[in-house]
Amino acid sequence: MEQYIVNGKVFLDGSFQEKTIGVEGGCIRILPKEEKLQDGVKVYDAEGKKVVPGFIDVHTHGAVGVDVNAATAEELGKIGHFMATQGTTSWLCSVLTDTKEQTLWCIDEFKKHKKMENDGANLLGIHLEGPFLAKEFKGAMPEHLLRDADVELLKEYQDAAEGNIRYLTVSPEIEGIVDAIPAIRDLGIVVAIGHSGADYDTSMKAIENGAASCTHIFNAMKLLHQHFPAIMGAAMESDIYCEAICDGRHLHPGVVRLLIKTKGLDRVVAITDSIMAAGLPDGNYKLGVNDVVVVDGDAKLASNGVRAGSTLTTGQALKNIMAFTGRPIEEVLQLLTVNPAKLIGVFDRKGSIAEGKDADIVILDGENNVADTFVMGKQISRQ
C-alpha cells in the first residue's frame, strides 16, 4: 500500500460512506473504516471532508497563460498542474482549428508530454474542435481554415497522434460530414456536433450515424424554433450527451435547470471550455490566432465582442451547478465524473471511486471547495 485516505466521507455508489481508501499501484482499494493501517505508509486525514472522484474535462483550451494551440510539452504540464489544483484529474487538450502544420506540431508536443514525468492532471488525449465547422457559427474559429469533410486528413492526424485523438467537433451541414461519421468513429474518435446551423433532419442523421455528443449546447449554434427545431432540437430530443459551460455567462441558470430536466442527469457533461486566462487576472490574452479581452472574468474576442471560451474551472463548475439547480452534490457529481468518462470511453478505469479503478480523487472541504487532489494515487502539490 502506498497511501491511505482516512476519516473522510467517501462517495461510493451514489452516496457518501465512511470508508478508508487505500492506494496500491496507483489504483483504489476500498477498505473498512476501521482497517488496520500498515506501518510506514503515508496517511491523508480527510476528517470533515468529502472524498469524491476526480473531475474530467473533455473541452479546454488552456489556463495560467498557456494556450493549447501554442503549448509546448512542458507547458501542457503547466496547464495540467493548475487543473489538478482545481479538481481536474483527467483532461483532453482542445486544439482550435489551425493550419495543418500547427495542428501536427500540437500533436507532436502532446506526444512529448505523454513521455514526461507529470505533477498534474492526466492528459488522456486530444480534442480537435474543427476544422470541419460551419462558417456562420464559427465562434472563435479562423474562417479561412474551415473546410469540408476530409477523412484522409483526419487519418493523417490520428496516425501522427498514435491513436490519441479521442474527440472531434463537426458541423453536420458541412459537405460530406454526415456520411463520414462512421469512418471517423472507425478511427477511434468520438464525434460531437456543434458550431452549427444544421437543420433538424441533418442533425438527426448525424446522430443516427454515430455522433455521440453536442459541443457546448446552446452556444455557437442555431437555436430551437417551434417550426424549425434545428441542431439544438435534435440534441435535446435525442439521447446524445450535451456539453454545458456552467459559468453563469454562457448559460443562464434557468437554462442549466431546463437542460438537466430535459436531458437527465446522465446525459449532461460539464466542461470548462477554458482559455489561457483561467487562473489569471483580467487582461489581454490569446485563443489560437485570436486576440481575447477578459473583463470581470468574461472572455470575448477583441475584434467583435463574441464570447471566446471561459475562465472557469471544474471545481467552480461543480459549485455553480449546485447553486443554479439546488440539487445535492450526490446528483451533480456525475456531470463532472461518470458522464465525461463514459463519453470518451474511460469509465472502466476513471469517473468513479471503485475497487481497482485509477486513484483519481478529489478532497472537498465543508464548503465543497477543492482542498486536495490525487492523480493515480499521487497527491498533487498545491503550489
Image (tube, grey):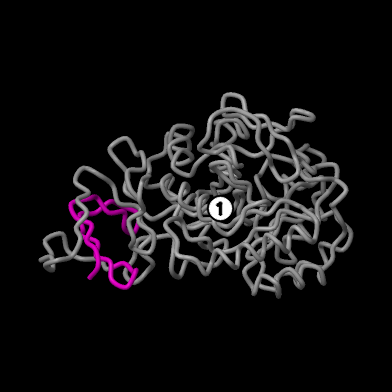
Q: Mark 1 — residue?
A: 75
Q: Is residue 312 above or below residue 43?
A: above
Q: Which residue shows up at 74% across the image and 29% down it? A: 302
Quarter of the image for the C terminus: give it.
top left
Is residue 26 part of the magenta span, yes or no?
yes
Q: Would residue 303 appear left or right of 87 to someone viewing this image? A: right
Q: Where on the picture, by quarter, is residue 86?
A: top left
Q: 26 or 57, which lies in front?
A: 26
Residue lying at 80% horizontally and 61% vertically, measured from the top left: 100
Q: Position of residue 237 (x, y in %)?
A: 67, 50
Horizontal side of 101 relative to 111 (left or right) equals: right
Which of 362 and 98 lies nearest the eye of the viewer?
A: 98
Q: Position of residue 208 (x, y in %)?
A: 73, 64
Query: Please, what is the three-letter code of the amino acid marked with disc 1?
Result: Glu
Give above or below for 245 relative to 15: above
Against 49, residue 125 (above or below) is below
Q: How many marks?
A: 1
Q: Main secondary structure of the magenta part?
A: strand
Magenta extent: 1-28
